[in-house]
Amino acid sequence: MLPLASSLYAVPLVILYPLLTAWIGIGMESKIVFGAIYGFFPMLLATAAGVRTVDRQLLVAARSMGAGRMQLVRHVMLPAAVPSVLSGMRLGSAMTAIGVVVAEMMAATSGIGFVITQNRTLFNTANVYFGILLVLVLAIALD
């Protein structure tokens, strides 16, 4: 399952947006779903990496004390993976915001991405740079 997720993370997710607009519509819902997909894979991969790096000694010790599978997950694996999960959430939240802006650039009538695209077509570079700066500040604030 993890190799599939890694492969999907490598695919440019922008190619999925036309499908989302066909399935969900061109409204706010498609932008939210696209942003969620954009931020999902970094969180998934970071969580999987955190679970894989759990010290085997902790697992052996918990098993020797009679811990079952769910107790191992709840009391050993998840607490040990918390740093990786939090770093994945940190990266995923910034990626989600960027995904929403990208979706706005492709099909929207409002938003930062729409403003950037509209001013780009009008050759209003000052507003384009301001929009890009605003996206950078947003990504840094979410990071």
Image: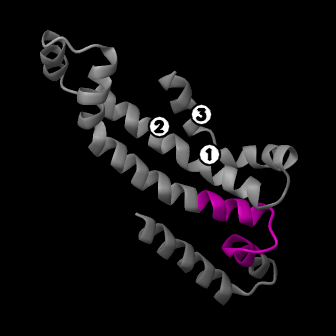
Q: Which amino acid type is shown beneath numbered disc 3?
A: Leu
Instruction: Name the residue: 19% across, 12% down.
Output: 63
Query: Picture coordinates of residue 117 (x, y %)?
Result: 75, 73
- The residue to which callout 1 is attached is 37
The image's mark for residue 8 is 3
Instruction: Name the residue: 62% across, 39% down.
Output: 11
SS label for mark 1: helix
Q: Which amino acid type is shown beneath numbered disc 1?
A: Ile
Provide the residue span drawn in magenta: 98-117
Task: Identify which residue, 97 or 12, lies in the foreground.
Answer: 97
SS label for mark 3: helix
Judge whether residue 101 is colored magenta: yes
Are the residues flagged by discs 2 and 1 in contact, CB closer than 8 Å?
A: no
Give the mark nearest the N terminus, 2 or 3. 3
The quadrant where residue 110 appears: bottom right
How packed mark 3 is, by other alpha carbons closer than 10 Å (few <14, some 14-19, many 20 or more), is few
Q: CA distance from mark 2 to mark 1?
A: 11 Å
Are the residues flagged by discs 2 and 3 in contact, CB closer than 8 Å?
A: no
Give the mark count.
Answer: 3
The quadrant where residue 132 appears: bottom right
Please indicate whether residue 17 sits to the left or right of residue 46 in the image: right
Instruction: Name the residue: 81% across, 77% down.
Output: 121
Instruction: Name the residue: 68% across, 50% down.
Output: 33
Visible residue check, residue 53? no
Judge whether residue 116 is colored magenta: yes
Please indicate whether residue 120 sits to the left or right of residue 128 in the image: right
Q: Look at the picture and state if 11 lies above or below 103.
A: above
- The residue to which callout 2 is attached is 44
Q: CA distance from mark 1 to mark 3?
A: 11 Å
Give the mark nearest the N terminus, 2 or 1. 1
Task: Identify which residue, 102 or 83, lies in the foreground.
Answer: 83
